[in-house]
Image (cartoon, rainbow, N blue to C red):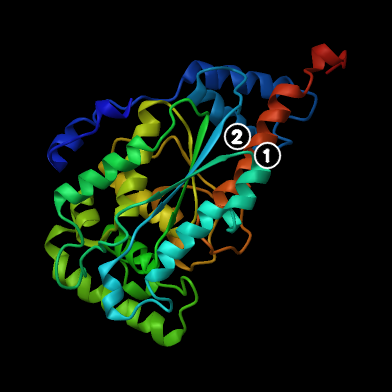
């Protein structure tokens, strides 16, 4: 399915291909809502679980959606902005964590195992960091499109839901810069500790982001160019995966601040490109709540987490499974012989 969008030779060509994205099935939504209203409970008593079941029904195009197969994809990339001293850990940690993922030793491995998701790890040219966005565009147009295509190609279109996450030393600064470029404010509104930055590092992040905004202020009205100016390969790959999932009508569970910031590149396009996306959790990163408000999303969970790796999405998958189990397995009042 992703071949209908990628490869694309330019941002203009990509944008033109996004004018007719698949939409949710309103009949299935209506049927699922009727079922929810007739299950053996007061209407609305399961709160967000009812909303999630109806959401899944709309994208699966059936009254009683299922979750037989889930895929979690973690993209990894390195960033030239680390030259500015924004990161408390060296960039070598990105590759070391990729190796840890592949050995099964990271948090995301355990969370995918318990939530029932197949994990894919996609490192993206870790030996070739992006450019320092205070000096140049982080990526060229073709590099962005290549990373998006690689993200799209990673999506297993036989899955019922896709979980997206990331790993990359320095990418909390990238996410904050993207959010600042997309939604305004000041760098201080968006920066946070990331992997453990102290007050001095956070101040460096803010200064560096404002320098980048000043460097690229002429392009902040074009979302794809913002991605080229500030983003990383993992952010571009997340966007590509989201679009590939949309073409296959597969719902997406986004992770925390960095993943949501990447996805937010698609929000200003005005085509509902994130309508099939849920947000797994509200990150402890201070900018995440503001970002969720900007794109009109409400996180499923709020656990004070800021790990990344897709960890919040993996935990939220269990909530989605619970929603569908109740939707499918509960009896209606008529089936149970209960008078209402």
Classify residue 165 as left or right of residue 262.
Answer: right
Which residue carries the number 2 mark? 51
The label number, if any, that marks residue 39 in the structure image: none
**Residue 180 in picture, x, y percent from top left:** 30, 64
The residue nearer to you, when weighing 216 against 144, is 144
From this view, report whether residue 197 is shown above or below residue 136: below
| Label 1: which secondary element | loop
**Residue 90 in picture, x, y percent from top left:** 39, 75
| Label 2: which secondary element | helix
User: Residue at 50% of width from left, 29% of height from top?
Assistant: 159
Quadrant hosting residue 150: top left
Circle 1: is it few (<14), some (14-19), or many (20+) Cα within 10 Å?
Answer: few
Circle 2: is it few (<14), some (14-19), or many (20+) Cα within 10 Å?
Answer: some
Q: Residue furthest bottom?
A: 200
Asked if residue 273 shows in the view, the reply is no
**Residue 102 in picture, x, y percent from top left:** 51, 52
**CB atoms of marks 1 and 2 within 8 Å:** yes
| Total numbered badges shown on the rendered structure | 2
Which residue carries the number 1 mark? 47
The residue nearer to you, when weighing 100 against 54, is 100
User: Residue at 30% of width from left, 66% of height from top?
Assistant: 79
Quadrant hosting residue 221: bottom left
Classify residue 98 as left or right of residue 218.
Answer: right
Quadrant hosting residue 12: top left
User: Residue at 42% of width from left, 53% of height from top?
Assistant: 259
């Amino acid at each position: 399915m992703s071949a209908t969008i990628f490869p694309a030779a330019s941002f203009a060509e990509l944008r033109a291909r996004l004018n007719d994205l698949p939409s949710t099935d309103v009949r299935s939504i209506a049927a699922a809502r009727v079922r929810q209203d007739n299950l053996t409970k007061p209407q609305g008593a399961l709160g967000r679980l009812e909303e999630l079941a109806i959401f899944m029904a709309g994208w699966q195009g059936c009254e009683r959606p299922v979750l037989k197969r889930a895929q979690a994809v973690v993209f990894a990339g390195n960033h030239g902005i680390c030259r500015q001293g924004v990161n408390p850990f060296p960039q070598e940690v990105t590759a070391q964590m990729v190796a840890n993922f592949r050995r099964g030793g990271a948090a995301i491995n355990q969370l995918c195992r318990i939530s029932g998701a197949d994990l894919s790890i996609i490192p993206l040219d870790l030996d070739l960091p992006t450019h320092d966005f205070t000096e140049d565009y982080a990526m060229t147009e073709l590099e962005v499109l290549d990373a998006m295509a690689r993200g799209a190609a990673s999506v297993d279109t036989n899955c019922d839901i896709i979980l997206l996450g990331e790993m990359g030393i320095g990418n909390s600064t990238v996410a904050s810069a993207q959010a600042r470029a997309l939604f305004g404010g000041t760098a201080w509104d968006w920066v946070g500790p990331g992997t453990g930055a102290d007050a001095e590092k956070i101040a460096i992040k803010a200064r560096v982001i404002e320098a980048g905004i000043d460097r690229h202020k002429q392009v902040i009205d074009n979302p794809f160019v913002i991605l080229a100016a500030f983003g990383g390969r993992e952010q571009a790959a997340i966007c590509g995966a989201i679009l590939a999932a949309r073409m296959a009508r597969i719902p997406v569970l986004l992770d925390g601040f960095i993943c949501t910031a990447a996805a937010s590149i698609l929000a200003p396009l005005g085509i509902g490109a994130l309508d099939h996306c849920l947000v797994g959790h509200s990150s402890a990163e201070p900018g995440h709540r503001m970002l969720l408000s900007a794109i009109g999303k409400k996180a499923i969970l709020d656990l004070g987490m800021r790990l990344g790796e897709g960890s919040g999405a993996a935990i939220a998958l269990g909530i989605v499974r619970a929603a569908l189990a109740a939707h499918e397995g509960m009896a209606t009042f008529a089936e149970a012989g209960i008078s209402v």
